[in-house]
Amino acid sequence: MTLTEKILARAAGKASVAPGDVVFAKVDKLMMHDVSGPGVIKVLEEWKKRGTNLERVWDPDKVWVTEDHFVPASDKISAKNIITLSNWTKRFGIKKHFKYGLGQYGICHTLSHEEALVLPGEVYVGGDSHTNTTGALGAFAAGLGHTDIAYVLHHGLIWFKVPETILFKLHGKLPSYVMAKDVILRIIGDIGTEGGNYKCMQFSGEGIDQMSMEERLTLTNMTTEAGAKNGIIEPDSITESYLKERTEVPFQCVLGDEDANYLDIHHYELDEMDPIVARPFSPSNTCGVREVQGVEIDKAYIGSCTGAKLEDLRAASRLFKGRKVKVRTEVLPAAQSIYISALHEGLVNIFVDAGCVVGPPTCGACCGAHMGVLGPKEICISTTNRNFPGRMGDIESKTFLASPLVVAASAISGKITDPRDITT
């Protein structure tokens, strides 16, 4: 069995499963945020009217909540949603509620690994499509809709159809000017936004062996943009070291069988890769950065669950140091802990000295809600994961997706720029 099949078999209490099987699986962890949470609560309220009342959450210690999409509150509705969520977590004894303005908080998919809330071999579901991110830890991580999340809160179980697995074998080592974001954009450009539909996208090879945990998380994060049910990477010594720095909770790594069957296997040579961008209006509309070199931009954005981890900020700071940006540039660390580390390392000073605006952890700009939306016909280059029409603001705006290095280089020149063309 593959890694995903093994995890789902364990969760379903079965000796083995195969792609296409429908299993009823026990859930180990569940996440909601300030957008999905109120939506789930509405479902629960409707069920109550029909006679199905949630008396208690199946296991309050396995549920966690964060405020990330509309913080700081962008309007009265956003403020009300946070109050609604706070009252609900208090009522049901949910202790892991990461509140904006009260210490550690941040983007849900970042907290899942920053706080070691999910461990290898677990089944983790979240009320957000990019829950796939956490599969880089060797867990089965998948996003669910409001109704399914409500069901899990009642029963601690949910059904899954076991997905087929596509294996992406990464060979060689990334050049200094290429990041995991370039790799996943290249893959999505090759297979398309439907290439992973209800499939598991698994990554392996010596390229993965040499890749940091934070870079691995970028790969699994954007399996969502290929339509995948989940993205996953087998845990190894890098996984163990990363988690042991963050938790004392014991865990056991699960590995797939050597003779596991895969739907397809794709091979990529990392040392031959160039920086990639995804042009409007699809993550699959990719090309080498030099094919769009010189396109003038209005904004550069370094943020989101995809591109604002500590290593992402470090990469961008290498180019920003001693230079000035030529367009408005925003840097929003993905969690408060990352913000603090960036402060201690002097990265925030580098950003501010370069002319960037450094803001609080939030999903606001990524989803075009607040904290810097785009106006008509504005062009942005961003470390985020989606660029369909209106994603980051006005329907007539355009977003190019790129790595933190490409975004930083472009901010410095005021136009889309290959990081190799910025002398370091």
Image (cartoon, rainbow, N blue to C red):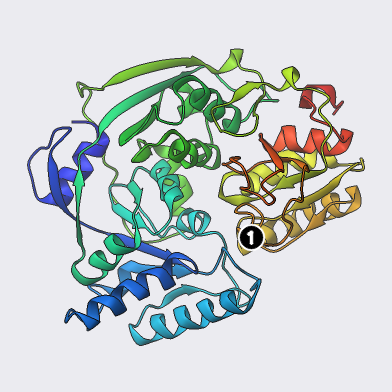
Note whether 46 is above or below 21 in the view shown: below
Q: Is 134 left, or right, of 8 in this rendering? A: right
Residue occupied by mark 1: 369
Q: Position of residue 21 (x, y in %)?
A: 13, 38
The kind of secondary structure element at disc 1 is: loop
Quadrant for the C terminus in the image: top right
Q: Determine if residue 410 is in view.
A: yes
Q: Position of residue 80 (x, y in %)?
A: 54, 81
Binning the other alpha carbons within 10 Å of mark 1 as few (below 14), some (14 to 19) or many (20 upward) gives: some
Q: Position of residue 228 (x, y in %)?
A: 37, 37
Q: Is 139 left, or right, of 290 in this rendering? A: left
Q: Position of residue 288 (x, y in %)?
A: 67, 19
Nearest the eye: 214 or 152: 152
Tell me what residue is drawn at x 24 percent, y 58 percent: 27
- What type is the residue that disc 1 sits on? Ala
Nearest the eye: 30 or 158: 158
Note whether 268 is above or below 366 in the view shown: above
